[in-house]
Amino acid sequence: MTELFSSKWKFDHLLPSCKGKLTVITVAAHFNERVDPKKRRDKVYIGCGAGFGGDRPMAALKLLQSVKQLNYLVLECLAERTLADRFQTMSVGGDGYDSRMHPPGAQEKVLEIATTLGLNVSVAVAYEVSVRESGMAALSRLLGGSNSSTKKPYIMEGVRIWYSYGAAPIVECLEKYQPNVIITSRVADAALFLAPMVYELGWNWDNLELLAQGSLAGHLLECGCQLTGGYFMHPGDKYRDISFQSLLDQSLPYAEISFDGKICVAKAEGSGGILNFRTCGQQLLYEVGDPAAYVTPDVVIDIRDVSFQSLSSHKVLCGRANPSPESVPGKLLRLVPKDCGWKGWGEVSYGGHECVKRARAAEFLVRSWMEEVVPGVNHNILSYIIGLDSLKTASISDDPSSWRTSEDIRLRMDGLFELKDHAVQFTKEFIALYTNGPAGGGGVSTGHKKEVILEKQLVGREHVFWQTGLKCSKVADSITQEVTREENLLKTDVVHEPLSLPEASLNICSVDCSSKEIGLSSAPSGQKIPLYTVCHSRSGDKGNDLNFSMIPHFPLDFERLKMIITPRWVKDVVSTLLNTSSFPDSDAINKRDQWVNEHVKVEIYEVRGIHSLNVVVRNILDGGVNCSRRIDRHGKSISDLILSQQVVLP
């Protein structure tokens, strides 16, 4: 079994610093067609071993013990927040990487552990290559191209960048080395799973229908237990109320993928959690944006007709993913760190009688003190009261009577400033509450730090490079062998001919709406009911944009739901996210609403296959996960707050 790790490379392997060593570069251009690809298996079994960097390793071990037929285990552990944190560490003199997430370093660590255990293993790496501006001419000569002075796609020395690669570097490692372990830098989540499908099932880069199906499987698996009951259980919701014990025993998911594109996602037989139409529907729409054009580096997918059919309590058949008209993206995503200012924050607790009013007074004082010292910065400060409205969307209504009485609240004020001095000044003013603020304020804490965002850019594939290599442990003679790639992948234009799946493999995937699981009941009309009685949802971030699904419990409610979930309704619900204070006056609300109307855009997409809506709200997450001043930087809590809204179905 081969393990695939999405990892991270320390940014110090620059072309002009090779010191005589052979540096081999592969161009991430439009895919070359694989020459005579071999079908090694009729079916491949691929498991998810981690959905993010903080996932539980014990769950991966349990999956390996429970599902003996697994051929590959994929551990995905990178996200924009992870990368930004590592860059911050590097910028203050640290290594800038976790030794377990640095491909060459992790390669050495795996070999060290294998040697300790007496195992002979081969470990391949695939990671991005950075090129200094001064090394462009040498690189151009190496690749046989010209260095146009009008095109400078390279980043200057000393700036860390990341690219979102597709499956090709992993397929290259599998074909050349057949390793036990592959460790990569940043690879798109779904591509980690697609690579072993391409390699084992004999697919080629122009088999777009197969790539779409394989990428669908990868997208469903990439978040780990979120497919099998994690982040789904919801006490009080009769459709999602699973026991604590069942959640404790949930299984990571795996998939069976056939050479003709048939896909089943599954969990270990007899395990806890849940795998069904609803969990698959939530994961299908999780952070995809436009479902007609879900972009991966390998293929742009149309998932609007995707459907699911439960084959058993632990297996679901998936189908009808299609390539979009613009089937292969000509550009790859590049992330470049960019300063976004200095954050300063402070917290203080109040309890007992009128504690909310005292917190309001404290907020007023800190804002006034800051205005005295640094006029005009109050718009940079966000404040909220934990225990009252820390998630900022308790209700569309702004009626204070809707606030519940609280005996223990905590005021947090969070500012993002251009200058470090302003962030430091803010913390000083906040600490002054100890002697100058309302009575009974305790537990003051403050801090400041530099914030970095990852600016997204699209770069032509011809400007993106990776390199691969292999090392093997030799327990008997302690010899380590290194293999380096000596040939370059030349840029070619590929004509992508459509390849149709057998009709039988698609018909079997249609949803049986008469099944017990889906049902035909519908919600009552003409009366106020909470939205969670009609549908379920999961939300997440797409940069500064919020993405949430609306999945009816019963398909017959889909048309009625569409009449409720309109752009205006969505804007009304989420507008309170932009309140800079827990106590906005009429002027602040008017300014907020004007900003919402000018900058916040709502896109609502129909997903026919699962009778659902996917909603994208642009410019609502306070700048995105790496600089937001909100507690919930990803917007993940917003789905349940939306579901709590009262609606009247027609």
Image (cartoon, grey):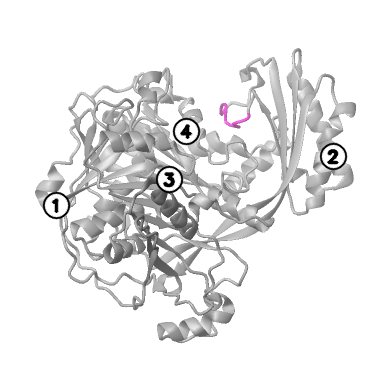
Q: Position of residue 602 (x, y in %)?
A: 48, 45
Q: How far apart are marks 4 and 1 (CA)?
A: 40 Å
Q: Earlier in the sequence, mark 2 or mark 4?
A: 2
Mark in the foreground, 1 or 3: 1
What amino acid type should be assigned to the residue bearing mark 3?
Answer: Glu
Quarter of the picture holding the C terminus: top left
Count of number-bearing discs: 4
Residue under the image location 30 percent in, 57 percent down: 195
Amino acid found under the numbered disc labelled 2: Lys
Q: Which residue lies furthest to the front in this view?
A: 477
> Does label 2 or label 1 sit earlier along the sequence?
1
For mark 3, give the secondary structure: loop
Q: Distance between the residues labelled 2 and 3?
A: 39 Å
Q: Does the magenta stretch include residue 39?
A: no
The residue where tag 4 is placed is: 639
Q: Which amino acid does label 1 sit on?
A: Asp
